[in-house]
Amino acid sequence: MQPLKTYGIGLLGCGFIGRVHAFSHQVMHYYYPGLPWRARLAAVCTSRPQTAQQVAQELGFESWTTDPAEVIERPGVDVVHVCTPNACHKDELLAVLAAGKHVYCDKPLTADWAEAKQVLAALEGYRGVHQMTLQNRFYPATMCARQLMAEGALGELTCFRAVFLHAGNVDRSKAHGWKFEPAGGVLNDLATHVVDLMQHLIGRFDEVFCADRIWARERPVRGNARRPAPVEAEDHACMTCRRDDGLVGAIEATKLATGMQDELRFEIHGERGALAFNLMEPNWLEFYDAGAAGEPMGGRAGFTRIPCVRNYPELGASWPYAKSSIGWTRSHVACLHNFMAAVHDGRRAEPGLEVGAQLQQFVDAAKLSAREGRFVRVETV
């Protein structure tokens, strides 16, 4: 048997999402048997020594640090994951690209469009593999939706709507943190996911009109409830998205949806059919065939629930087995596998950092629209 190619993995940031990235490396061989590579957790960086050391011990990293440069420049680190707060992404990405390491970046790409343009410029001459963590593309149900769209199953599109609903900011006593600062907010945090998924399925948007809201203008400082800090990022955003061909639809992203969990839903309608998906029921894609007979007594007209479950193409469906229920972390494993396969094969990965830059341009257009109360053009990246 040929020895496996080993890739040293470095993580910048290992809070919630960093642990998801590390987990995805650790379990990948369970889902994709026979891979010609393995991952070695080489280095982790967090902002505090005690958390960095704890993470290294718990997850099995070989070394830890509080200096991102030590991870990026460390010999034996081949792939760098950017999992830090949004405001840190730009400088870290520029350093990784300059070092020529492969990079896997959690969304959003950067804090704003001005920073994203710097990253785009740095990609010129870069020879590594890069990808965004946009895992909602990597459910069998959303992959099936993409296939049906490509086959023209819906015909010419008539309208669409999509939401990403959370409830985490309803409590006004929730402590202040970086997600309440300018680089945070639901446009960067949630809208990037749902906008990417919709553009992945139906094509990019040309204009956006946005209205947003900050629910609590102040939040208590963590550990000192009597000391308030200003909130500078939106908790709720409603957008009308328009294409030049006339298609118009609605997208909402919020952390004020009382009673909701992790509710990413979409509906896409066309002259020949419709699709519907809900992340809280990720095993199913709903498809409506407008050509089905409606008589007698309703005939066979109506939405059909397609059991997508774990039906990944080729590799990836064999464990536990294709008909077993899928979960949220499975999409992350599939997304990371897509990236690592491209690293190993020496080819381009999708969605690349350019997709992250386009999403950043969309977010900045939405923010400008909210300030000025008008449709704003989303420029081509």
Image (cartoon, helix red, strand yellow):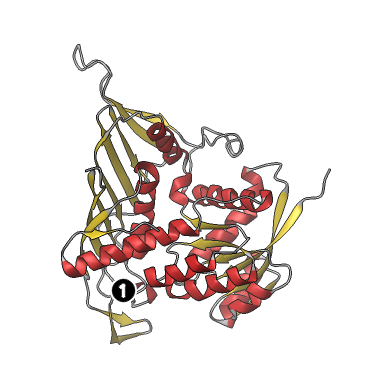
Asked if residue 356 is positioned above or below residue 324 in the image, the reply reads below
Q: Which residue is located at x 63 percent, y 48 percent?
A: 341
Residue situated furthest top in the rendering? 296
The image shows residue 378 at horizontal and vertical percentages of 30, 58
Asked if residue 293 is positioned above or below residue 95 in the image, the reply reads above
The image shows residue 59 at horizontal and vertical percentages of 63, 65
The image shows residue 305 at horizontal and vertical percentages of 36, 30
Residue situated furthest left in the rendering? 373
Residue denoted by label 1: 174
Q: In which quadrant of the rendered view does residue 184 lie? A: bottom left
Residue situated furthest right in the rendering? 1
Q: Which residue is located at x 57 percent, y 36 percent?
A: 317
Q: Which residue is located at x 45 percent, y 65 percent?
A: 109
Label 1, residues with CA under 10 Å away: few <14, some 14-19, many ≥20: some
Q: Which residue is located at x 61 percent, y 74 percent?
A: 54
Residue 79 visible to an observer of this rendering: yes
Q: Is residue 167 left or right of residue 9?
A: left
The image shows residue 261 at horizontal and vertical percentages of 33, 54
- Between 57 and 132, the one lying in front of the other is 132
- Between 365 and 72, the one lying in front of the other is 365
Q: In which quadrant of the rendered view does residue 9 lie? A: bottom right
Please state which amino acid type lies under the numbered disc 1.
Answer: Lys
Q: Secondary structure at mark 1?
A: loop
Asked if residue 338 is positioned above or below residue 125 in the image, the reply reads above
Query: For the N terminus, which image quadrant?
Result: top right
Total count of labels: 1
Asked if residue 136 is positioned above or below residue 140 in the image, the reply reads below
- Between 243 and 135, the one lying in front of the other is 243
- Between 253 and 73, the one lying in front of the other is 73
Q: Is residue 8 left or right of residue 168?
A: right
Query: For the C terminus, which image quadrant?
Result: bottom left
Q: Is residue 220 left or right of residue 284?
A: left
